[in-house]
């Protein structure tokens, strides 16, 4: 993310919905430049345009799944490959809900003798094409919008396992290392995945930094490895370093 984009986002977080003219004046650039910046940030799912201005996306509702699936797809594919390359054959995994975790599963199609527990029907469908993968699907309520499985039954199911690696996605990362999600039911399942994993790997592209969501999932102190596509922003870097998280960037 270029410095001007971060300045733009910081200004909107501090002052709320803002006009193009005000942003141009604050950042000392033309309105045309600001409009281009807004389009790029909107494409990344960081902003929403309103009549007469622009503001941060809702903290209550996530971007539609079909839009998220193609958003930053190149970055997600690089992240997925990097994470998969670090997974040895014969390991046990839990993979949760998310478009980036789905890219990890695609990159695992050639892995041998892996056992994968998942509450994501998309992940199960992808990995069913790997004849050397044993796929175990959690029970629970299926969310129609993204085919994720959530609920008390899902939590109870996850608690039966203890796996080598839990691979999780996230909707937002605060500067202090707080991890955020939109659905409290999904959060409770992910928390159980963290508890049942010997190592926890977080996969998330750069757009998750500074994105607000309603529900607190946890903190980077609960993460062992973080796979992303760009260096951690300076504002959040201290939290990652203090937590001892290994950051791996998919160039």
Image (cartoon, grey):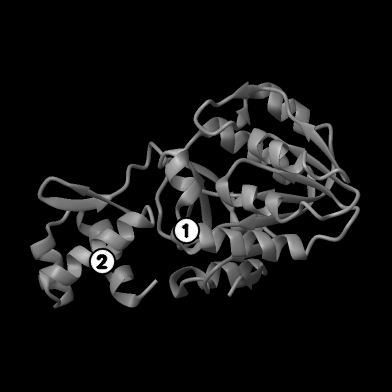
Answer few, some or many: residues within 10 Å of disc 1's Cα (few below 14, many 20 plus, some between 14 and 19). Answer: some
Residue at coordinates 58% horizontally, 68% vertically from top-left? 240
* Residue that mark 2 sits on: 37
* Residue that mark 1 sits on: 72
Question: Residues under labels 1 and 2: Cα distance?
Answer: 16 Å
Say what secondary structure mark 2 lies in: helix
Residue at coordinates 40% horizontally, 50% vertically from top-left? 212
Q: How many marks?
A: 2
Quarter of the C terminus within the rendering: bottom right
Q: Nearer the viewer, residue 205 or 220?
A: 205
Answer few, some or many: residues within 10 Å of disc 2's Cα (few below 14, many 20 plus, some between 14 and 19). Answer: some
In the image, residue 54 lies at what x, y percent? 20, 53
Describe residue 59's horizontal placement relative to residue 167 as left or right.
left
Q: Is residue 170 visible?
A: yes
Say what secondary structure mark 1 lies in: loop
Q: Is residue 224 above or below residue 147?
A: below
Label whose residue precedes the other's in the sequence (1 or 2): 2
Q: Quadrant of residue 201?
A: bottom right
Q: Nearer the viewer, residue 245 or 57?
A: 57
Q: Quadrant of residue 192?
A: top right
Q: Nearer the viewer, residue 74 or 79?
A: 74
Quarter of the N terminus within the rendering: bottom left
Q: Is residue 115 above or below residue 183?
A: below
Q: Nearer the viewer, residue 111 or 90?
A: 111
In the image, residue 195 lies at what x, y percent? 74, 43
Residue at coordinates 64% horizontally, 66% vertically from top-left? 243
Q: Is residue 225 visible?
A: no
């Amino acid at each position: 993310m270029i410095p001007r984009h971060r300045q733009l986002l910081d200004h909107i977080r501090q002052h709320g919905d803002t006009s193009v003219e005000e942003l141009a004046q604050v950042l000392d650039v033309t309105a045309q430049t600001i409009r281009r910046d807004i389009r790029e940030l909107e494409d990344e799912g960081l902003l929403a345009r309103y009549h007469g201005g622009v503001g941060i996306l809702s903290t209550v509702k996530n971007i539609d799944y079909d839009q998220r699936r193609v958003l930053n797809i190149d970055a997600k594919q690089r992240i997925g490959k990097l994470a998969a390359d670090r997974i040895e054959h014969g390991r046990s995994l839990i993979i949760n809900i998310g478009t980036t975790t789905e890219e990890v599963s695609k990159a695992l199609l050639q892995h041998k003798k892996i056992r994968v527990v998942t509450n994501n029907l998309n992940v199960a469908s992808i990995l069913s094409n790997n004849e050397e993968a044993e796929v175990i699907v959690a029970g629970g309520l299926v969310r129609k919008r993204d085919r994720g499985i959530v609920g008390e039954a899902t939590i109870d199911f996850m608690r039966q396992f203890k796996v080598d690696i839990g691979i999780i996605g996230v909707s937002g990362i605060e500067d202090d290392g707080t991890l955020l999600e939109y659905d409290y039911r999904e959060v409770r399942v992910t928390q159980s995945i963290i508890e049942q994993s010997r190592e926890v790997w977080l996969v998330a592209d750069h757009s998750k930094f500074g994105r607000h969501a309603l529900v607190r999932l946890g903190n980077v102190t609960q993460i062992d490895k973080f796979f992303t596509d760009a260096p951690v922003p300076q504002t959040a870097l201290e939290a990652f370093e203090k937590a001892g998280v290994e950051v791996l960037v998919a160039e």
